[in-house]
Amino acid sequence: MKGFNVRDGAMRGALVGAAAFALTLPFTGCVGGLPGRDLSGAGAGGSGNPPATAGTGGGTTASGSGGVPITGTDAGVMTGAAGNVGGTPGRTDGGAGTGMTSRGGASGSASVACGSSTGGGAGSVGTVPGRGPIFPPNARSAATLAVPPPAVSGGTLRVLSDGRTAVAADPDRDRVYVVDLTAKAVTATVMLKQGDEPGRVVEDAAGLVHVALRHAGAVVTFDPRQAQPTVTSQPVCASPRGLAYDAGADLIHVACADGELVSLPAGGGPAVRTLQLDRDLRDVVVSGSRLFVSRFRSAEVLTVDGDGTMSKRTTLPAFSSVAARGGQRFTPGAAWQMVATSDGGVAVLHQRGVSDTIRPTPGGYGGFNPCNSIVHTTVSTVAGDGSVKTGPVLAGLVLAVDMAISPDGKRAAFVSLGNATNQLMPTTVSSTPQLTRMFVADMTNVVDQSSGCRPDGTHAPCLPPSTTIVDPTTNMMINSTGCPPSTQVVGEPIAVAFAGDGAIVTQSREPAMLALADGSSISLSTDTRGDAGHFFFHANAGGFVACASCHLEGNDDGRVWNFDCNTATGAAIGPRRTQSLQTGLRGSEPFHWTGDESSFTQLMSDVFVTRMSGPKLPDASMDAMLTWIDAQPRPLRPAAPSTAAVQRGAALFNDATNVACVTCHSGARFSNNSTVDVGTGQMFQVPSLVGVGARGPFMHDGCAATLRDRFNPACGGDKHGITGQLSSGQIDDLIAYLNTL
């Protein structure tokens, strides 16, 4: 550690436990005064640059709080620790870091006040009082585009079988580029219709390229060897997502968001097989006669046999490590990408989210320790024999939306869109981002769960500059010393691939380019698609979490979070399902399930700034984000299987006297925006039903796994509409109608 030394006892108090953290910044005349391990008095004075004097520090074991004054040009007071790792009453392990706030969950006294014997998990505050976040995003555009760019889905780059030709789909500009990596030149550009949103790319045995159009319901095919490719389009399903080429059958398999798995002849023509699987399909991988199909929000992997039978559903493992939020339990979700492995299995790049309790306090969602965010990135593998492994925390990779495995199967590369612009605070004139945007690791380390959370440059990206944490599994300090920065200029990375020679190619959305391993880049387009709302929505706020970490692709993650309590009031909160953003937010205030956020400004202050350790945004930036969210296109829906059933369901829904759905769910948003008790024991905002069929589980606490479950008495009974008298057939009709909204 450079520029700040403390005595051993003070260092132990500052760094003990999973959440303890030290950060060295070039403060002038920093005062020591770090609390000791028991927080019962002032810690020993440290030495700074220039030398520091003894501080006031200290605190009590009841509150676990202390203060570290800062003098000189950076005058102010740093708040001390608020408790201990895990928030267990009676322990006082958490201590203030060197010149920063360091928190390990909630203090024992706070736990008692909230009526719980355990705290909200280890955390760390990522802001400096009076100065803002330590690693804030650095917005490069204040524009609000007339045609807003779509939410990022990632995985839009493929290097073809010749090893030197890359095909990059550009969903921001509705184009597909063919690039000669050797000549470093774009050789062809396929222009698509506005809003088509090209996504996954595959190559067949004849050398033809196939691209899924996420919002056009089709797959386009062209020959990348042509200077002006002839493009054919084949309708496939409402919302195509994943593509895979089956060489044995010469088929293109298409995974669709509505649950269809469609098989098309590679040479053209209508589908030869359509299977109906679960909703929210993401990627498909061919393994012999079998297909592996992933689901996006749940991160499940489905196995489909050659005869079309779904023979297995694999749920990826849960995870816990004392190095990640003090040992809280994480469960899988958000399967951004699934790729083939050399053993005939698959590797899934996905997120994990906390299933234990969290507390909506400063830094409660994430702070300056990348191991302590409520959402993190990891890789799980499903081998050809069905065995499953899950890897350590890829700490700090915010919105890792794509991965690639090297041709020899030994290395994996990842890109982090969320870290595109974050810099160490205080920022300088330089605009060079300082958090990891592209990370390469050995596959053996990627799935080595024993490492827990070890941001050492081998098991996970290096820590940010000038930061140090303690690995509680080894009691060894980890910092960024010896970690060279990436030489690639990757802009806002959305995809990554390996060329034939093993070199890494990275795709950036803004500016539109391919970044090469030698530090050079290939421009794809000079048309700018920088949008302030899009930027802030996808940016690492400062606590190693982004809005898009939970609101996937501008929508939701389907997760039910367990909130401990409101420390300001002591009131219990309980389970809360992530709310959909594709329902129209402007004018629907107040926000959150209980309507406790009176405006978007208050919501941003409470969540983005406080819980996510983000900067306070100007009013114009918040308005830009709200505008961008409301302009996002909704996924296309398949045609209803029975028009008559939909019509009968609509009649039931609009029967205000005998069924009463329309009493609350009215208007264009299917919500009267009121706060009511529907039999669940508390007053909640009436949610919009726009897109409701695709966003289970349902209700504020996820009590209904399916729409049919919503009509069980446990989800409100006849206080939630008058539905107890409906027959099974009538409920089927009502569900058919809801699926069309």
Image: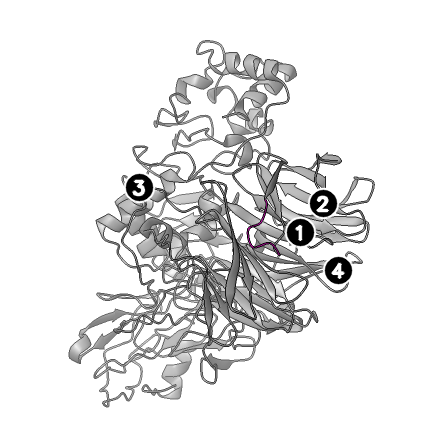
The answer to whether residue 100 is seen in the rendering is yes
Who comes first in sequence, dot 2 or dot 4? 2
Report x, y in % for residue 238. 58, 34
* Residue 34 or residue 355, whichever sits in front: 355
Q: Secondary structure at mark 4?
A: loop
Check if mark 2's residue and mark 1's residue have beta carbons within 8 Å: yes
Residue 208 badge:
1
Label 3 residue SS: loop
- Residue 85 got which mark? none
Of marks 3 and 2, which one's residue comes earlier in the chain?
2
Give the magenta-colored segment's residue range.
225-230
Nearest to N terminus: mark 1 or mark 4: 1
- Dot 1 amino acid type: Leu
Q: Position of residue 347 (x, y in %)?
A: 66, 60
Q: Residue at x 22, y 71 (%)?
A: 77
Local secondary structure at mark 2? loop
User: x and y percent of residue 415 in the render?
Assistant: 51, 64
- The numbered mark, 3 or 4, whose residue comes first in the sequence reads 4
Q: Residues within 10 Å of mark 1 (few under 14, many from 20)?
A: some
Q: Which mark is residue 597?
A: 3
Instruction: Tell me the residue that label 4 is attached to.
Output: 383
Q: Mark 3 near mark 2, Cβ–Cβ under 8 Å?
A: no
Three-letter code, disc 3: Glu
The residue located at (36%, 79%) in the rendering is 36
Q: State yes or no: discs 2 and 4 in contact (Cβ < 8 Å).
A: no
| For discs 3 and 4, the disc positioned in front in the rendered view | 4
Give the answer, above or below, for where 256 lies relative to 202. Answer: above
- From the top left corner, tell me how far across and down residue 517 is, in percent: 52, 74
Crowding at mark 2 (Cα within 10 Å: few <14, some 14-19, many 20+): many
